[in-house]
Amino acid sequence: MRYGIVLFTSDRGITPADAAAAAEQAGFDAFYVPEHTHIPVVRAAAHPRTGDASLPDDRYLRTLDPWVALATAAAVTSRITLSTAVALPAEHHPITLAKTLASLDHLSGGRVSLGVGFGWNTDEMAHHGVPANKRRTVLREHLDAMRALWSEEEASFAGQFVNFGPSWSWPKPVQKRIPVILGAAGTEQSFTWLAKNADAWLTTPTEDGLGEKIELLHRVWREHEREGSPEIIALAGRHDAAQLARWAELGITEAVFGLPDREADDVRAYLTRLAGKLGLEAAR
């Protein structure tokens, strides 16, 4: 099982570049950052953890642009993979976002994956012109349009929400296919969307019953005639050796730990302690 780190970025505390460099040095395999373009002050959407309009962390108001954050991380690392937990591609024009992601993959040497969500904050999505009942459709079209731009010499796309004629767009990603990770609750609806459109599942922070949900994911994956097996990435809390052993038995491929909202020295010390508990080898 691989081990990753997610930094809930903000305009305080350790920077993404420092956190990614420290994580790579400590022996971690993956580095993730989140995305919110903004948080509407007046909202009807309830946060999944609080159940109402309150937020569990003020960093929701202060998140850095994920692609700028990952670009700074790419510049100071060479091995660790770079991803989002999660980004909201439906809030961006796919031609522009395709260019950004292809450039990041090109400059990082093919280390990018794309963690996506449907968007719990429907008020935020509405400010971007995304209807709440069409979030999944918009996300699918944006991914399909970006994949066309990444893979075709003259790409075009015709959909309900995205339309463009034959176009040139370089660079192409280093990877043949940028992996897409769906961060969503483990339901048959989510897994059906995943089997059609993505490559991996990222659990929600409060996901339970993982054994049954992983069986469901594999069944849906097979029903859609996908080859191989989906990657399964689980968000972890505190280090728990017994839990990690159970996860490995279930076939979870990566466990991701959150970083504390502290200054750089404190975060580096935390990473060193966590790496030691996990038995990771520091880079030399």
Image: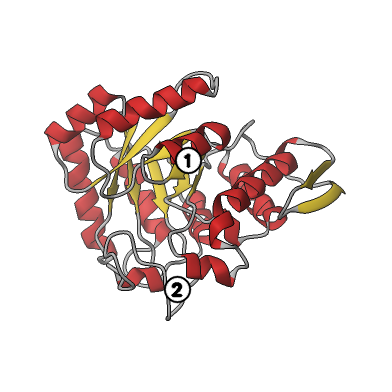
Residue 113 in percent (x, y) is at 51, 41
Read off the residue under disc 1: 181
Could you tell me if residue 140 is visible in this image? Answer: yes
**19 over 239 or under it: above or below:** below
Question: Looking at the rendering, which quadrant does residue 10 occupy?
Answer: bottom left
Query: Which residue is found at the position 35% from the left and 51% from the top?
Result: 6
Residue kind at label 1, given as amino acid type: Ile
**112 over 72 or under it: above or below:** above
Query: Which residue is found at the position 46% from the left and 66% from the top?
Result: 64
Read off the residue under disc 2: 39
Residue 225's disc number: none
Badge count = 2
Report the quarter where the N terminus lies.
Answer: top left
Residue kind at label 2, given as amino acid type: Ile
Report the quarter where the C terminus lies.
Answer: top left
Residue 192 in percent (x, y) is at 49, 34
